[in-house]
Image: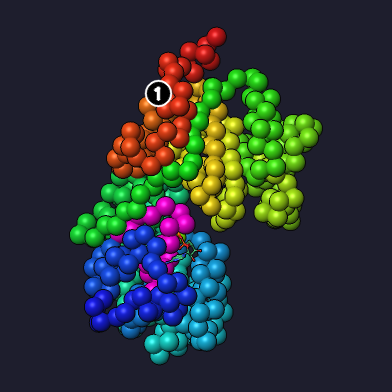
Amino acid sequence: MNSNEIDIHKELKKYFGFSQFKGLQEQVIKSLLNKQNTFVIMPTGGGKSLCYQLPALVQEGTAIVVSPLIALMKNQVDAIRSLSSEKGIAHVLNSSLTKTEIAQVKKDITSGLTKLLYVAPESLTKEENVNFLKNVTISFVAIDEAHCISEWGHDFRPEYRNLKNIIKQIGDVPVIGLTATATPKVQEDILKNLDMCDATTFKASFNRPNLYYEVRTKTKNIESDIIRFIKQHKGKSGIIYCLSRKKVEAVAQVLQVNGISAVPYHAGLDAKTRAKHQDMFLMEDVDVVVATIAFGMGIDKPDVRFVIHHDIPKSLESYYQETGRAGRDGGEGHCLAYYSYKDVEKLEKFMSGKPVAEQEIGFALLQEVVAYAETSMSRRKFLLHYFGEEFDSATGEGADMDDNIRNPKVKVEAKDQAVK
Ligand code: ADP
Ligand code: MG
């Protein structure tokens, strides 16, 4: 069956209740239904899951979906099951299943009931599983969060490196790779490692025209500067990212003392406190969360009005993801980063304990952050260029939404200031 014989609009409505595809979804789905290797680069929230879920549901056989996080897989399986009367339509295969559960999964796949099988890469490498999957009908393999294959990505997982090998053993099926990481280096790595340089690539724009980007030089008055900023945004929701747990606690306390409703969030807090603080933020019982990067994965609060980086992030990739949590609803989103060269040196020192190869990558990524912070050009242009996208800083959408464009200034080198 190819895409010409399936009314994918009808199927979209039937399974998902949507009357329109979002962005490039339709083209991606057609490519996959035509059995082409396909590569999808879309920002978070772009609707990548549907690009493989719909083709899986309308085709014969089972689609294998590789995903790095058990929690994400469980969410998706529950969501798919809610679309159908058959629980067996989607399954997770992992090491936590009992023998009886595994037998049921295999039975549902063999009978053709299961359309989506979610697996962690380490389960897919198991010989027993590979042998089973070789002998059933597989429609295609989807590799979600495909940047995990690259050391240049923000979440390198060595097990992803084995995938190509295993897919070849399973059979000659189309592969779809999906990621929200848009840097050319990571893309190249993905295509090379999955041996799919022939893939049709679909890349959505990463421009977020409603976000305002600003960088301020970090001084010892940073806390009062932040307090002033928040008071100017009274009653609005915001996130402040800090590098360390200690800093998170300290900043949260300073804000509280100054009458701002804020809670800390970091991996050092117990699960109950973390969940409570997250809920308080989502329910708007507090305005501000002061957090380490542990906060944000899967947070979908549409009306976050500002994201402040108290300390610079370790890559522009992280910066884009973290600032991306502002203005999801299309409304105002102020992204304010504080920058000092001392912080860069601190991050470099952190990295010096790591293996050399990792260090080199870390330094290179950090240098891009430095260049972004110190640039006097359009920040949006800079960011998008980093993601391999050309942006016209005269006419592009959101062209005047950054400090360099609104208040052109003589370049300040924070490096020189640190010396003083
Ligand atoms: P990504 O994996 O790219 O971050 P998701 O697949 O999680 O994005 O989708 C983000 C959101 O977009 C989900 O809430 C999903 O239901 C919604 N979505 C996806 N496709 C459509 C569509 N065609 N119309 C409306 N909403 C959609
Ligand atoms: Mg996704």
Q: Please identify the residue farthest to the front as the structure is shown.
A: 395
Indicate the amino acid at tag 1. Answer: Ser
Question: Label 1: which residue?
Answer: 376
Place of residue 156 in the rendered image (x, y in percent of width and height, measured from the top left) = 42, 50
Q: Residue at 31% across / 53% down in the picture?
A: 203
Query: Which residues, given as a range, are shown in magenta?
Result: 39-54
Q: Is residue 174 left or right of residue 63?
A: left
- Position of the N terminus, as image quadrant, is bottom left
Query: Residue 275, how many percent across, how many down?
Result: 70, 55
Q: Indicate whether residue 176 is drawn in magenta.
A: no
Q: Position of residue 14 (x, y in %)?
A: 44, 80
Residue 8 located left or right of residue 4: right
Residue shown at 66% from the left, 32% from the top: 232
Image height of 150 relative to 262, above or below: below
Residue at the top extreme, as displayed: 420
* Foreground of the two, 163 or 382: 382
Compare residues 167 and 265 and report the one nearer the observer. Answer: 265
52 is within the stretch colored magenta:
yes
Inspect this view and state whether residue 363 appears.
Answer: no
Disc 1 secondary structure class: loop
| Dot 1 alpha-carbon crowd within 10 angstroms: few under 14, some 14 to 19, many 20 or more | some
- Residue 23 seen by the camera: yes
